[in-house]
Image (cartoon, rainbow, N blue to C red):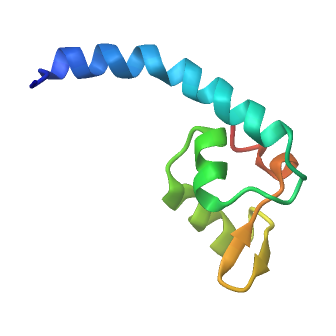
Amino acid sequence: MRLDQDEIRAIASELAPRVAELLEARLSERPEWCMSVSEAAAWAKVEEHRIREAIKNGKLPCVRVGHAVRIRRSDLFGMR
């Protein structure tokens, strides 16, 4: 089955609010310092490179655990 671009956009627009709800529910049950870069980007509705850039420039605090980066949800309010 092949979908054209309009069908893909329609499906994506229907799914986006539900995905956001599921992500918000999942994150609300987790500790404050638990968001990865990809989770933070999804929650803030920005691209991952914006999160990484903000960390690099010192505008977004984070905790590094080995190679992993963890971001506090409350620090993202300025990006949302």
Dividing the picture into quadrants, the one containing residue 22 is: top right
72, 61: nearer the viewer: 72
Rendered position, 65 above or below 6 = below
Q: Residue at x 10, y 24 (%)?
A: 1
Residue 65 vs 58, above or below: the answer is below
Q: Residue at the spot x=74%, y=63% of the render?
A: 59
Identified at 83% across, 56% down, the residue is: 72
Q: Pick the residue in front: 65 or 62.
A: 65
Picture coordinates of residue 65, whole percent (x, y): 77, 80
Is 69 left, or right, of 20 in this rendering? right
Residue 57 visible here: no
Q: Position of residue 9 (x, y in %)?
A: 29, 20
Outermost residue to the front: 1
Farthest residue in the right direction?
A: 31
Q: Where, by quadrant of the figure, is residue 44 drawn? A: top right
Quadrant in which the C terminus is drawn: top right
Which residue of the protein is positioned furthest toward the bottom in this rendering?
66
Q: How many marks?
A: 0
At 67% from the left edge and 60% from the top edge, which residue is drawn? 36
Picture coordinates of residue 15 (x, y %)?
46, 20
> Horizontally, is 2 left or right of 43 in the view?
left
Q: Position of residue 47 (x, y in %)?
A: 49, 49
Q: Is residue 48 visible?
A: yes
Q: Is residue 33 above or below residue 57?
A: above
